Every structure is written in structure tokens, then in C-alpha cells.
Amino acid sequence: MTIADQELSQLGGRSSILARQRADHARLDRLMARARDTVDTGGVAHQVALRAVARLVFTHAFAEEAVLFPAARRVLPEGDPLTLRIETDHQKVDELMTRLDGSSSDDPKHRALMERTFAVLDHDVRTEEDELLPRLQQSMTRRELRLLGWQWELVRRISPTRPHPLVSRRPPGQTLSALPLTVLDRARDLLQRIDEATRCRFSRPLSTADRCLAGASGAVERIPVMQRGERPETGR
Ligand SMILES: [Fe+2]
Ligand SMILES: [Fe+2]
């Protein structure tokens, strides 16, 4: 039974992984609606809307791959193929969001690319809410679901915030990449916020610093150990 229509009490309360996932998926829906509403006017409002989608998606998915999916593989007999299907969607999202980030809202293909990206995100949410999470609900106690919820929330708050399609979607590469990529991504986010707060007065030095951090992040992604654990289905 899908978790989409269940009462909060059936999900194990607000702190269970089931309730936390559903709340985050609902927030994603609202952010995607805002990106659709601003696509015609484009400009800063649309950029901000897409950035909010990206920030939610990448931290959410990274924490799933670090905490939720390994737990599902431990307790569900079908955990490996099921999580692999979802990881394949995550990989597609990484690649599509990277292209979307580089495309301008003036480009006639931008809307189609955005809709393709959002369709994969919708598919990811449905697989989780209709298949993965109901199975976990059957196999774990409420206490275990709440503990998993806390672990996922903690990791989500310290996860990378940008796409890293070269890094493995599974441990050990995924786990090893977490610290350097989180530091680099969040430093880039800070530069972006400074740029916005100073109304682009220091854009040149800030964009030079951003390029350096982006280069460092690409170099981290290419370190062979960061690809360890990757399955061919989610490789690049
Ligand atoms: Fe999710
Ligand atoms: Fe997901």
C-alpha cells in the first residue's frame, strides 16, 4: 500500500523516515510548480526557483544513497534491484540537472529539458512512495523507522548540494566523496549568496573563486576511489 494516502500515525509519526520522505516530496512538488510558474518570465526568479529544486533534490538523494538504500538492501530480499532502479533515476537527474543549469530560460529547449527532468523526479518519488517505503514499513518496526528518519535527516543536512554524476552512487565511493564535496559545494553556495547580497558588485573575483572550487570538485570526482562501488547501470 502506497504511503501517499496514509495517516501520519500509520507512518510512525512525524520523525519516521516514511513521514520525512513524504513531506520532502510534497515540498519538491511545490518547488517544481514555482519553477514552472516562472519559466515564461525567466530571469532571476526562475533561476532562484530552479536552484531551490536542485538544493532539495541533491541533498535528499545523497542522504537516501548513504543511509536509506543501504538499510533497504539489508532488510529487503528485493532491496538490491529495487534501489538500483531508483539510483538509475538519480543518475539521470544528475545529468539532466547539470544540462538544465547550463541552459538559459530564453532557449526554446529549456522548458522541454525542465519537464524531462521533472518527469524523472516524479517517477523517482512514485517508486519510493509506492514500492520502496511501503516494503520498509512492512519489514521494520516503528522505532527502526524513526531511527532511520533521524539518520537520514542528519546526513541530508551535511550532504553535497550539487550534482556529481561521476561519483559512485554506492559506498565506499559515495561515502568517501561526502566530506570533500560537501565542503566545496557549500563554499560555492556561500559565494553565490555573497554575490546576490552585494548585487553582483564583486562578481569577477567571486566567479573566479567559483571556477576554482568547481575545478577542485571535478578533480575530487575523478579520483578513482570515488567511483568504487558503482554499478554499471549507474556509471557514466
Ligand atoms: Fe525520496
Ligand atoms: Fe530519490
Image: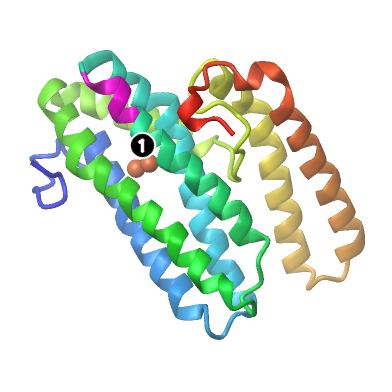
Which of the 4 image quarters holds residue 133?
A: top left
List the residue tagged with mark 1.
Answer: 86
Q: Residue at x 59, y 80 (%)?
A: 42
Q: Residue at x 49, y 48 (%)?
A: 93
| Residue 103: image location, x then y, percent | 65, 66
- Viewer can see residue 72: no
Decide: few, some or many residues near mark 1? Use Cα within 10 Å; few <14, some 14-19, many ≥20: many
- Give above or below for 204 relative to 74: below
Prevailing secondary structure of the magenta residues = helix
Q: Is mark 1 within 8 Å of ligand 2?
A: yes
Which of the 4 image quarters holds residue 81?
A: top left
Which of the 4 image quarters holds residue 165?
A: top right
Which one is in front, 155 or 100? 100
Tell me which segment is drawn in magenta.
Answer: 78-83
**Tag 1: residue type?**
Ile
- Give above or below for 184 relative to 189: above
- Viewer can see residue 29: yes
The chosen color scheme is: rainbow
